[in-house]
Image (cartoon, helix red, strand yellow):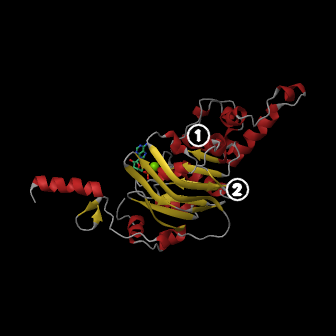
Amino acid sequence: MSETTSKAQTQADAQTGQQSGGTTVEGETQEELREEWVQYEFDGQPAISTRDVNVHYGDDHALHDISIDIPKNSVTALIGPSGCGKSTFLRCLNRMNDRIKAADVSGEVEFNGKNIYDKGTNLVELRKRIGQVFQSPNPFPKSIRKNISYGPRKHGDIDVSLLSRLLGRDDSDEEDELVERCLRQAALWDEVKDRLDDNALGLSGGQQQRLCIARALATDPEVLLMDEPASALDPIATSRIEDLISDLAEDYTVVIVTHSMQQAARISDQTAVFLTGGYLVEYDDTDKIFENPESQRVEDYITGKFG
Ligand SMILES: Nc1ncnc2c1ncn2[C@@H]1O[C@H](COP(=O)(O)OP(=O)(O)O)[C@@H](O)[C@H]1O
Ligand SMILES: [Mg+2]
């Protein structure tokens, strides 16, 4: 093959995602997807059900027909190589993609019996019920206390009405209770209870991320979406976040994107594996995915053959 032909070939391969020899440019083998690999059955109720969710960024078809049920009060991990659509899918679950101009989402996401993509959905309310925590901790440059009470105050969930004040009801009691409850739930209370009025930016990275989790809990959500919440943290802080996530799953539904397979194996109850091109390939109990997956590509991925 001349140099120009091979270059052209490489470009064509990059476009189709294929290489001569039946592997993709990312090193995945070719395999036909089977619907039964993602028909995950579980006891209990789903917190969220997605139906045929597709996402395009302009001409780029980033997610293909994702239909899954996410069980309540458990941890669901989304794993797969970089660029396979994990964050895109997570953002579909509380319409964060609405903020991305290029993103075009179709399909349904059912939550509490309603399709969140129906017209008239109150997005502020939706994101209180389905909260989120990002990759890098992003506390407000305010006190620890204000980080938690700011949202509920803004939305009027802490009673600050004139009438309450005239009647002598003190909303600071309500605020104190909220702040303590959320910090306890986020396993941060003991470390910060004596400095609630200090600036949150003075906390360590791991503490800041637990504060962001506490802040998300302040709006009383049912679901918490987390996109690689520990990837900017050291191993000790990571392990504290992991313990916290496992505890939270007793009361909340957690959906977590992670690039760490060990982390998914440690903390999740079920795992959805996305692979190149934005396809959900397999979804099952975490043990099953890691010990005996149906798909050869999933097996190759979790044994580290690519990605
Ligand atoms: N804001 C965006 N604009 C355009 N394309 C995007 C945007 N976000 C993600 N993509 C594309 O969508 C695909 C999936 O990205 P992403 O969901 O970030 O994957 P992952 O989280 O698995 O790494 C990638 O091809 C990426 O380039
Ligand atoms: Mg991502």
Q: Is residue 7 left or right of residue 143?
A: left
| Disc ID at residue 208 | 1
Please tell me which residue is depicted at 70% across the width and 56% down the height of the picture: 251
**Residue type, numbered disc 2:** Asp
Which element is circle 1 on? helix
Mark 1 vs ligand 2: CB below 8 Å: no
Q: Which mark sits nearer the N-terminus, 2 or 1?
A: 1
Q: Position of residue 86 (x, y in %)?
A: 47, 53
2 vs 1, front mark: 2
Residue lying at the far right of the rendered structure? 167
Between residues 53 and 268, which one lies in front from this camera angle? 53
For this orientation, the residue located farthest to the front is 119
Q: Which mark is residue 251?
A: 2
Density class for disc 1 (Cα within 10 Å; few <14, some 14-19, many ≥20) is many
Quarter the C terminus occupies: bottom left
Question: For residue 166, which quarter of the picture?
Answer: top right
Badge 2 marks a residue whose secondary structure is loop
Within-10-Å neighbours for mark 2: few <14, some 14–19, many 20+: few
Looking at the image, which is closer to me, 289 or 205? 289
Question: What whole-number distance in Å separates the C-alpha atoms at marks 2 and 1?
Answer: 22 Å
Q: Quadrant of residue 50?
A: bottom right
Q: Is residue 279 above or below residue 293?
A: above
